[in-house]
Amino acid sequence: MAEEEEGEAGGHHVLLLPGPMQGNVNSMMKLAPSSSASLPHHLSHHRFHPPPPPPFRRHPLSFTNLPQPRDQDHLRCLPDDHPRSDRNALADLYSSMNSHAKPLIRDIILSQTAAKPKITCLIGDGFFGGLTADVADEVGIPVIHFRAISASCFWALFCAPNLFESNELPIRGEEDMDRIIATLPGMENILRCRDLPGFFRGTETNLVDPLKSTVFDCHQTLRARGVILNTFEDLDGPLLTQMRLKFLRVFAVGSLHAHLNYRRVSDAKTTPSTSSFWEEDRSCLTWLDSQPLKSVLYVSFGSITTVTRERLMEFWYGLVNSKKRFLWVIRPDMVAGADNDERVAAELEEGTKERGFIVGWAPQEEVLAHKAIGGFLTHSGWNSTLESLVAGVPMICWPCFADQQINSRFVSEVWKLGLDMKDLCDRDVVEKMVNDLMVHRREEFLKSAQAMATLADKSVSPGGSSYSSLHDLVEFIKSASR
Ligand code: UDX
């Protein structure tokens, strides 16, 4: 949670409530300093708190009626003995938040009513759309939803009931996977069935359970005063046009981290901030300093994804056989079922020394901006996708769940920023795609990635679409929360 306040009695005080996952915290925590950074004249009376101190950062929400979460754990609201496999973890986190968090958040807001200024607006993570809309109704303040996932995924989920009605869904087995989805407004004929999130793959005629609750929460955004999306007009214009027909207000303010970069360039005194749950190993930056220009492939699968040891080895062989240099993030909890994950990383590192460097957690934005990086093998989480796009780095996408399947399709087919390795991964495919990205099609991808980076930069510069949208958001908050 973070707060924005005007500092004077009767001012505006916004409570930011991100879902307790690294990707959600990373983007949402940048909203407050971004608003301040891009719009200093409009916010001259606002004071933004710095990022929360480490203990708070590790436990963005604490639940008195759940066992204390493990330290260094990305899913903070689950009991210690939860198995935390990708799909179960998210589903259980979701129900845990709904059953336990609601009274806690309401109490936090109500306990602030005596304070000056009291909380006058809630920006809630749309992942818990129903929860945040209910709480805002109960305490009588406006709510705006923030989506940490891509606009395309949010919109596809929102439209899912129509796809069932028009018989485009459900997906009818493996042989149906390459069928094109024709009628999604704003992205007609772009997605194949295999590009939809995994839980669309159910075969029931009605929505399957995880899909049902996710779609339900997307529809709760109709109760919000608006929705904030971490994207920009030049990236997702056609979708945004469609969304504006449904939602009261759509604020396309992305890329949020680029607002901060812009501010850092124009104001050297602004220091970079981090909302990392894990400690960053900065030694990889020193290693990168000694590598040739655009020669290194950065490999990272975000903060949640786990892989089997067998899959990890396929990646390792593929990377080593490609003969390209690589920097690889292997989180200590990344290898599913491994007894000693640190040993797995150490073993791989031993056999990799010649061209590779492995860390447990990297300062990703700085890595992607480093001149030695020439490509990114990513799981296509939305933050990673935007960070790569803003840095002008082409991608190989290996999507796992949530919005990642859609994101990778857009990266390869719509924005032409790289290759989609969806459903294909083995050592030969990895080796081939690394060489395609870093050698054979290098110039083509670098050129389109650079062109997109320029558009991203333009959007957060004064007069750009995201710059203006952030301004509109601030003005709206001021008018709605009087
Ligand atoms: C989750 C979902 O999985 C993703 O699909 C959704 O779009 C957002 O929420 P996550 O899997 O963690 O997020 O991926 P991503 O959105 O890419 O966020 C990862 C964040 O961690 C990025 O901001 C990245 O910069 C940061 N990171 C990752 C580091 O700082 N260091 C690392 O070593 C790896």
Image: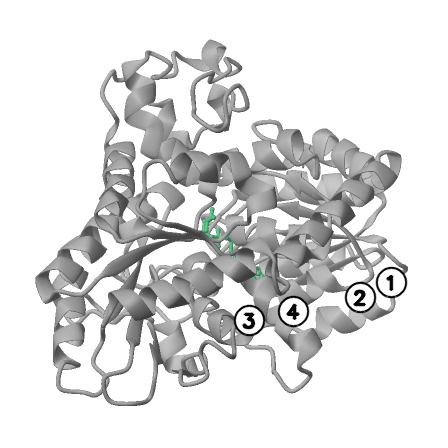
Q: Is residue 40 left or right of residue 299?
A: left
* Kind of residue at disc 1: Gln
* Residue 273 drawn at (x, y percent): 55, 77
Between marks 3 and 2 in the image, the one whose residue lies nearer the viewer: 3
* Kind of residue at disc 2: Leu
* Residue 222 drawn at (x, y percent): 25, 43
- Front in this rendered view, residue 295 or 370: 370
Estimate the spatial distance between the alpha carbons at disc 1 and disc 3, rounded to whole Å. 34 Å
Residue that label 4 marks? 262
Do the residues bearing badges 1 and 3 touch, measured as CB atoms within 8 Å? no
Residue at the location (65% across, 53% down)? 456
Estimate the spatial distance between the alpha carbons at disc 1 and disc 4, rounded to whole Å. 26 Å
Res. 3 mark: none
Residue at the location (15% across, 60% down)? 135
- Front in this rendered view, residue 216 or 78: 216
Residue that label 1 marks? 291
Between marks 1 and 3 in the image, the one whose residue lies nearer the viewer: 3
Estimate the spatial distance between the alpha carbons at disc 4 and disc 2, rounded to whole Å. 23 Å
The answer to which of marks 1 and 4 sits earlier in the sequence is 4
Estimate the spatial distance between the alpha carbons at disc 3 and disc 2, rounded to whole Å. 31 Å
Residue that label 2 marks? 288
Res. 38 mark: 3
Residue 23 in sight: yes
The answer to which of marks 1 and 3 sits earlier in the sequence is 3
* Kind of residue at disc 3: Ser
Residue at the location (80% across, 59% down)? 353
